[in-house]
Amino acid sequence: KNLKLERCIISVEVSLFVEKEDVSLKEAEYFQLDRLETSQILIKSLKQYVATNDPNDTSYQEFYESLFLHKMKKSATPEGAFAKYDKEKISQVLEDRINGMQGDNLYNFLMQRRKSEFLNIQLGQQETQTLSACKTYHMPAIEYQLRQGGKMIVSGSSPFIWRFGQQIDILLFCNTKIARNEYTNHILSAYIFLAICRSGLHTELQQFLGKSRASIYLAHKQGICRYDYPYESFKQGEYREYMESLLHDCVLDNTYKILPFQVIGKARLASDSVSPDASESEYYELLTEKVVESIQNEFNYDYQVPDYLQVSGYELASNVRDIVQKRIDPILKAQ
């Protein structure tokens, strides 16, 4: 099987916020941009700004104008005064996230990294976003031999990386509000990339970035969150065990048990968060309660069960606490 981790994870993230299209509304008049369209315009414009790696660059404004015009030509925006209102509103949010937020913004983020190397890592041959100001390193894909026989090819890319000495910073984007010390599914792709770097599964990548201190930054609706993962927090063997377990489960596990990172991360439900003496069943009941609350709250986008699982049925694994300890606890241990 050919597993593209970055794309796989991103597709899952996007699906969490995509509502099924109602065909009967195709000819309806828009009075405001929907949540998804607004988010896409903002994130693309923010990435355009950061991709220049120049804090004073203003080309993102022209990019935003052309992007909004493109949406208008596709009849994806309101008409007349409604379109003007949406355009000005999104433009203001864009400016705030780049230059406002009481200093917790992308302008200052880039200013602090003027002496860092801006780079993009590509594993295997695949298309990726073109970042004109960065240096792209092309490396071969990971060929991993499964214990049960067969070979897995792991390819992908990780843009928006800055390296200075033994420190690497990875920047991600989202359009939701993230509370301080809150963990979100948006950081999953960066953590898995970090785990690959430190696991030894890719010798060249390990030598290049594997022993660096790492920080994951998430640019969200109200600022930028930081998650630190020192090299010493895990041993190389533990990172390798983590990745091998993940790869084997991804290919060989044919059960339909849900493990909603969004719910676990937001509630900070690490395997030892209930109490040191809590039983497996107590943790199971608590997590089940949180999942049900999230699903039943129509205004909560933390977690929605995929359609195919609604048809086939879904449940938490009976040993979900052990799985959380193995799969999610390491991510929740950021410093």
Image: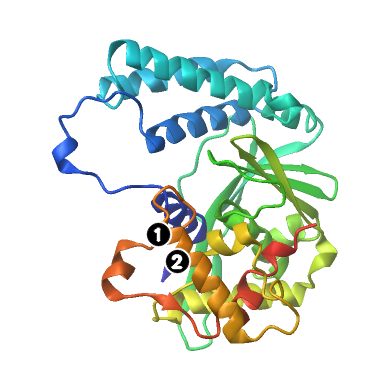
What is the quadrant of residue 8 in the picture?
bottom left
Q: What residue type is labelled 1?
A: Gln
The image position of residue 188, as x and y in percent, is 59, 57
Whether residue 26 is visible, yes or no, is yes
Nearest the viewer among 40 and 144 is 40
Residue denoted by label 2? 292
Coordinates of residue 208 in the picture (x, y in percent): 74, 55
Q: Residue 296 carries which label?
A: 1
Under mark 2, the amino acid is: Val
157 left or right of 329?
left
Q: Residue at x 50, y 39 (%)?
A: 129
Q: Which residue does the image show at 51% across and 27% down from the upper left?
A: 45
Dot 1 falls on a residue whose secondary structure is: helix
Which residue shows up at 60% across the image and 15% down it? 58
Q: Is residue 319 above or below residue 181?
A: below
Distance CA(mark 2)–CA(mark 1): 6 Å
- Write down the quadrant of residue 54 in the picture: top right
- For the C terminus, give its image quadrant: bottom right
